[in-house]
Amino acid sequence: MMDIQEAIEWTDDRVFAKTGKRLDSLQRTILEGTLENQSYKQVAEDYHCTKDHTKRVAAELWKLLSDVLGEEVKKANFKSTLKRIKNSNISNFGSDYIQIMGDINFCNEHCPYPKVKKATKTRSPSANSSTNSPSKQPEQRHNLTEAPEWEHHNNRLAEITTLKKWILAEKIRLVTIFGLPGMGKTTLGRELVEQIKDNFDYILWRNCSETLTRKSFQTNLIEFFSQNQETKSSSLIDYLRLNRCLIILDDLQELFAPEKFAGTYLPEAESYGKFLKEMARSPHNSCILILSWEKPTEIATLEGENRHCRSLQMGGLGEAAAEILSNKGLKDDDKWGELIQLYSGNPSWLNIIAATIADLFNRSVDRYLSYPGLFLGDLEPILEEYYQRLSAPEKSVILWLANQKAVDISQKPGVGAIHESPLPLSEADFIKAINSLRKRGLIEKATDNESSLFDIPALVKNYVKNYS
Ligand SMILES: Nc1ncnc2c1ncn2[C@@H]1O[C@H](COP(=O)(O)OP(=O)(O)OP(=O)(O)O)[C@@H](O)[C@H]1O
Ligand SMILES: [Mg+2]
């Protein structure tokens, strides 16, 4: 089977070797669409332009490719032409590719595009400026004005190691950190930026809001990149290909609809989904880092099909959360483990409840834990708001899970343990709800010997039983 991205790269390199110009993002989208047997109408929709414009660009593109490949190429035969070239010499794609890459290096001097700077961790301050705009200072290229202040914690080493491996070693293009509010996603993202910033030519941190339309976001990115570039382009993907950029999109959940399954875009934000797909599928040298309560719907599909997309579920701090309790001057450290477990090691939740324990329980964790019922203090409205965002089927499943021990959800309702319970959901809605709760990081997985057991965080269980 032909790898579509490999085929596009190969074609792009052929075009570059012959003309010194790269394919632009619409041309790439046309090739991708053609290889996926899409009509021009579908390609135009994917690219948010008119069908006529797509057809005009495609006609020029087929002329160009006919010239480059030395035979007539059109939409109807592009796929078979590539297959034939590939089959005519099994190593053609490989060895030819290397040959072409050699050509590119050779003709780099005459290349009309700025060279992609090889960013290294050990760059000297003077090397920090770009090869194509030496007068620009790195601060202009690293825009963190929307990012929170950097607070250094040394307790997320496993997460940092994984993220560095994906972003730096494997050059993953789309990375998502998702999980419950207050777990420390933003703090982790900020720490990561601090540790890897020297590897990027450009860094931009943006916080999502309902009012940040996809168009204005894209224009904003293009403006940011173009201010430092001599070669201007109207296409974002061109900048992302020519430079190594890191774009952090925090609070992506702001673009998702409440009371719907996780990761469902608000109608006005739907084009973000297409944007993320393009970021994962089109070849480029950059990384988009998403921080969100909910994993966007298209990420699961992309992860299945595409090695350029990864996601990390943000878990609690575990024992390391003891630092938070000790900073608040809490007593009874033999009970801290229990408190941390009850609050899933969520640093924000623990900070809030620790303040309440200090104020109302004279800093005694023991007295707080032995207080009858569950007292949540200032955390109650926060959990309430979060719970209200869930869809109706998810609320049913949460209520049902709250009243049992960890369950094996591979058993459909109507079989075994689930059969006994009065869950008012069809099989289809049940599994959709479970899937959605996984995308929120709201179901914890504990693997038994043979089956996967699922449970919800202890605090959510208690909250649902006592308050909802
Ligand atoms: N690794 C950590 N060690 C100690 N405290 C932490 C850590 N990470 C985050 N915190 C604290 O927890 C709180 C929440 O962190 P943060 O804002 O990063 O969470 P978040 O997952 O981005 O939340 P939200 O989803 O609401 O945006 C902050 O007060 C932060 O100082
Ligand atoms: Mg955050």
Image (cartoon, helix red, strand yellow):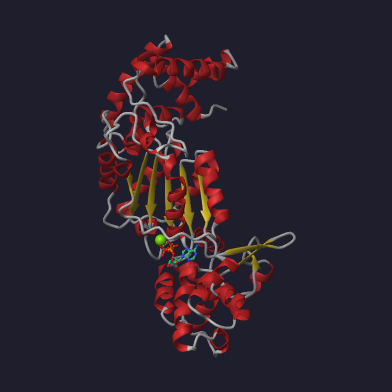
Residue 167 x, y percent position in the rendering: 49, 43
Observer-nearest residue: 82 or 372?
372
Residue 15 x, y percent position in the rendering: 39, 18
Residue 199 seen anywhere in this rendered image of the structure: yes
Q: Where on the image, by quarter, is ligand 2?
A: bottom left
Residue 235 horizontal side relative to residue 156, left or right:
left
| Residue 10, above or below 282 | above
- Residue lying farthest to the top in this orientation: 70
- Picture quarter containing residue 25? top left
* Residue visible at 60% across and 17% down in the picture: 90
Observer-nearest residue: 63 or 157?
157
| Residue 369, above or below 440 | below
Residue 201 x, y percent position in the rendering: 38, 38
Q: How many marks?
A: 0
Residue 42 seen anywhere in this rendered image of the structure: no
- Picture quarter containing residue 170? top right
- Residue lying farthest to the right in this orientation: 449
- Picture quarter containing residue 383? bottom left
* Residue visible at 46% across and 41% down in the picture: 173
Observer-nearest residue: 113 or 85?
113
- Residue lying farthest to the bottom in this orientation: 372
* Residue visible at 70% across and 60% down in the picture: 451
Residue 86 horizontal side relative to residue 407, left or right:
left
**What is the quadrant of the N terminus in the image?**
top right
Residue 462 horizontal side relative to residue 271, left or right:
right
Residue 155 x, y percent position in the rendering: 54, 61
| Residue 294, above or below 216 | below
